[in-house]
Image: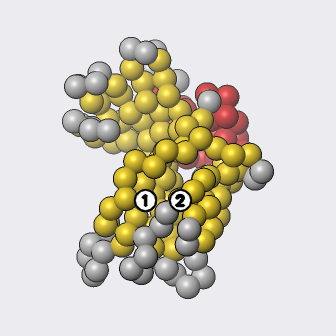
Amino acid sequence: MILSACVPIDAEVLRGYDDWRGTTTLMTHEREIHRSPDGDGLMAARPVVIMGADGRAYGVLTDVRRRDANGPAIDRMTSGDIPLVYTAHDRRLTHCIDGCQPAEVGIITLSERAFRTAAVTGLPLRAWGLRGRYDGTVPAEAFARVLAEADTIR
């Protein structure tokens, strides 16, 4: 996804417009939702709504990183016992300040109903991968902020 402009709406919600695709994207800042006890594994997430001529798409952008040489390789994502629709977008080196961290970024696709439910309950996530599991919860407040802004756009 290419964002041609990112304009802050409030302290937590970003709005981007992609003039090539004609879509508007609303999302929160990335939030850390998991850090392994040894500090090597980290998962961050942010709710997102993408709006365009074809309608709206709802989801959660994920960023799973490791602070060692072995990058994450996510097999699946679940919420409790429920499998989620997850698509890996890229595996890359990120956060290259004092050495780089191998990362896998992707998106969990949600229905509008599931997104609205998460705005009340939050969304517990588990990333299952070759090098372990990452557990965390995307806070309800993050979904609610994005929805509040999306509901003002028709």
Position of residue 43 in the picture relative to residue 51 (left or right): right
Quarter of the rendering occupied by the N terminus: top left
Circle number at residue 28:
none
Residue closest to the eye, 9 or 74: 74
Please state the horizontal and vertical placement of residue 145, each as a whole percent of the image: 53, 40
Q: Which residue is mark 1?
A: 104
Element at label 2: strand
Amino acid type, residue under disc 2 in the picture: Ile
- In this figure, which colouring scheme has been used for the structure? secondary structure
Task: Please tell me which residue is depicted at 62% across the width and 67% down the height of the picture.
Answer: 133
Please state the horizontal and vertical placement of residue 38, each as a whole percent of the image: 55, 85
Position of residue 18 in the picture relative to residue 71 (left or right): left
Task: Please tell me which residue is depicted at 37% across the width and 53% down the height of the picture.
Answer: 90
Amino acid type, residue under disc 1 in the picture: Glu
Q: Is residue 32 visible?
A: no
Q: Are marks 1 and 2 in contact (CB under 8 Å)?
A: yes
